[in-house]
Image (cartoon, helix red, strand yellow):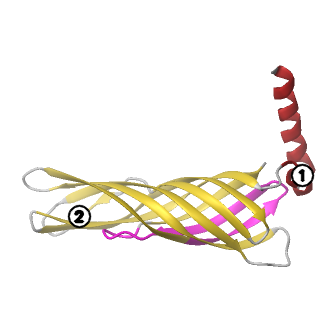
Amino acid sequence: MRIISSGLVAALAAGVCCGTASASDINPLGFYIGAGVGQSNVRNNGYYSSNYYGFDNRDTAWQLTVGMRPISPFGVEYDYIDFGSPSGYSGSYYTNGNSNTTASALFAVGYLPLPVPYFDVYGKIGVARLESDATVFGPNAPYRQNFTNSDLAYGAGAQWKFANIAIRAEYERIRDNSGDPDLLDVGVTWTF
């Protein structure tokens, strides 16, 4: 077992040191992992006892990414996004509220065929499962409502590649009846 672990560590180190060509020999499907942090805009709208509540607030958000790019113009990506827990004014009847919103999304990723090997521009489209837990505070008592919805997700971004590391800037948005949360973030990916 120790020999296998040492060999795996040596293979990964060689891939990182030798750049993209060696990584593609080890990883023909182009598997990568990544993480990002940025700012979300969470919208949550609804009615409780015929009174409107809703807010449109920003918060710090983060995401984790697992993907593969088997051919240059196409990839597949799974993202877990935590949009944060924004709080603030929540409508005419209620004084304030907050929302915890997360999503799991599966995307098809298309890359523009640019002649620059270290720079990519891409678009993403897929489906996301959005989970929101909203709490609004009124004069009588707090009211809590959970939403779960699967709907269209889309985004776009650019990345600069340095050997097996890529620095990304991207925008993602998820459709939802109670408000479309979105995320603008900067992240990093590592291709095995």
Question: In the picture provided, is 180 more to the left or to the right than 158?
Answer: left
CB atoms of marks 1 and 2 within 8 Å: no
Mark 2 residue element: loop
Could you say where residue 98 lies in the image, as x and y percent from the top left?
29, 55
Asked if residue 119 is positioned above or below residue 27 in the image, the reply reads: below
Say which amino acid is labelled 2: Ser
Number of the label disc, if any, that sits on residue 110: none
Quadrant of the image occupied by residue 112: bottom right
Horizontal side, residue 25 vs residue 33: left or right:
right
Residue 78, x across and y down, in percent: 59, 56
Q: Report if residue 178 lies within the magenta region.
A: yes
Residue occupying image coordinates x 86% and y 51%: 23
Crowd band around label 2 with a 10 angstrom C-alpha radius: few (<14), some (14–19), many (20+): many
Label located before the other in sequence (1 or 2): 1
Q: Give the magenta-colored segment's residue range.
A: 155-180
Secondary structure at numbered mark 1 = helix
**Vertical relation: 153 (above or below) 15:** below
Q: Position of residue 83 (x, y in %)?
A: 44, 57
Compared to residue 39, the image places residue 31 above or below, namely above
Q: Amino acid at mark 1?
A: Asp
Q: Which residue is labeled 2 in the image?
A: 90
Residue occupied by mark 1:
25
Looking at the rendered image, the quarter that the N terminus falls into is top right
In this orientation, which residue lies closer to the viewer: 2 or 115?
2
In the image, what residue occupies the spot 25% across and 57% down?
97
Question: How far across and how far down the image is residue 192, in percent?
Answer: 78, 48
Residue 50 falls inside the magenta stretch: no
Question: Which tag is nearer the camera, tag 1 or tag 2?
Answer: 1
